[in-house]
Amino acid sequence: MKSFFRSSIGRKIAMALSGIFLIVFLTQHFLINITSVFSESIFNMISHFMGNNPLVQFILQPILIAGVMFHFIMGFVLEWQNRKARPVTYAMYKGSKNSMFVSRNMIISGIVILSFLALHFYDFWVPEMDYKYVQSLPEDPDRYYEELVHRFENPIRVGLYCVSFIFLSLHLIHGLSSSTQSLGTNNKYAMTIKKLSYAFGIGIPIGFCFIALYHYFLHL
Amino acid sequence: MKLFLKIWRQKNNKSKGSMVDYEIEDISPDMSFLEMMDVLNERIIDEGGDPVAFDHDCREGICGSCSMFINGEPHGPEKLITTCQLHMRKFKDEDTIYIEPFRAKAFPIIKDLVVDRTAFDRIQQSGGFISINTSGNTLDANTIPIEKESADKAFDAATCIGCGACVASCKNSSAMLFVSAKVSQFSLLPQGKVEATDRVLNMVNQMDEEGFGNCTNTGACHVECPKGISLDYIAKLNREYVKANLKK
């Protein structure tokens, strides 16, 4: 197994599996967040459960953070190796003639997403950890909706979130179809998977954008 | 036609190369690209210069020798052809044409536009064959029934001429399309299934040792391949590699 993950195919399969894991997480994150548009109480209830359930907090959350770190570190390692594989670049290279812009620039969209994650952690995860484990404040099942709304009062933050979601979309459009190719999916499903990748890669980030803008405009 | 050429000149593997400008006139649109290079070289020789070194052999799209990277694409702007099948009518009068060697760490430059593609040979030697008893008791291949779909797919994979356009076009210099075709052309047939496990493990291992980059599924290799080898073979290679690792 050690040699498998050291091989180029092993590494791309590991990248694909961690990517699919993050896509599953992203989907559940979206499904929870969208409830904030429909019902304050349901959003509070789910957020309270996710924030206080030991399984989520002490098993799933560390696995998620490890998955995120693995995907990013592996992404940078692969990029470094790939650059080494062509020490002298072409004077003229027309990548647009044979491949999509998003597929050639996953590292750029990935770096933007990583920067966004830093902001997102600063906005939500750090205050949550501070509330629960540093200040050890009493449990308040009704605070989550208000905290969410408060974060989206600042138009610059909402703008940064929306720009990041555009890059997330670019990353997902190639990432989803690419991961299935890496896992060896037969090409007869390629068109269906490509359509699904576009639908998911555009739909989910638009949904996240909508949530941020909804709370910003609702509480102007 | 009058053309402005920017050609990579490099004396040898150790020296530093650069793009050199040439102007060439009276080029017929019916000439092949290699014939245009021949005309240029004749002029350079007449002037006492060192002609541009470039690979060529069959000049009919079979051998995979011609390896130029023309105006940002391997084998030039047209699809499903090699450089020898590219004609000057694809260019306009007074066009500027960039001519570079295939660039990859695993394809070191020998001189000018000639690169060393023996990395592909070593990959092939590591497992791209079937072991056959040649003592006189060999079964005729035609006595083994093979379903049409597998035979067709194996044939399609075997059309790979090992030109290296996949490596040259890939932003990561990955050789995954070449290896996937060479693994599949055997593993799809009953004669090749016997050694399928060792073959895929050895060929992927050799590919990695040669210093090719990682595949990130951009699909550039398939688009630029003169034989149109499908990305499906890369997916098949991935499946076979996982299976082989589980068996080992």
Image (spheres, rainbow, N blue to C red):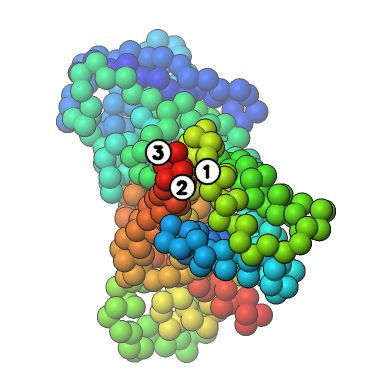
Q: Amino acid at mark 3?
A: Gly
Quadrant of the image containing the C terminus of chain B = bottom right
Can you say whether A74 is above or below A157 in the image? below
Q: CA distance from mark 1 to mark 3?
A: 39 Å
Do callouts 1 and 3 point to residues on the same chain? yes
For this rendering, which residue is in front, A44 or A125?
A44
Q: Amino acid at mark 1?
A: Phe
Residue that carries the numbered disc 2 in the rendered image: A215
Image marks 2 and 1: residues in contact by CB distance under 8 Å: yes
Do callouts 2 and 1 point to residues on the same chain? yes
Pair 1/3: label in front: 1
Residue that carries the numbered disc 1 in the rendered image: A152
Residue that carries the numbered disc 3 in the rendered image: A95
For this rendering, which residue is in front, B161 or A160?
A160
The spot of residue B168 in percent (x, y) is 46, 42
Image marks 2 and 3: residues in contact by CB distance under 8 Å: no
Can you say whether B52 is above or below A206 in the image? above
Q: Is residue B14 left or right of residue B9?
A: right
- Residue B203 appears in the picture as rendered: no
For this rendering, which residue is in front, A159 or B187?
A159
* Label 3: which secondary element: helix
Query: Dot 3 falls on which chain?
Result: A
- Residue A146 appears in the picture as rendered: yes
Q: CA distance from mark 2 to mark 1?
A: 6 Å
Image marks 1 and 3: residues in contact by CB distance under 8 Å: no
Can you say whether B68 is above or below B151 in the image? above
Earlier-in-chain disc, 2 versus 3: 3
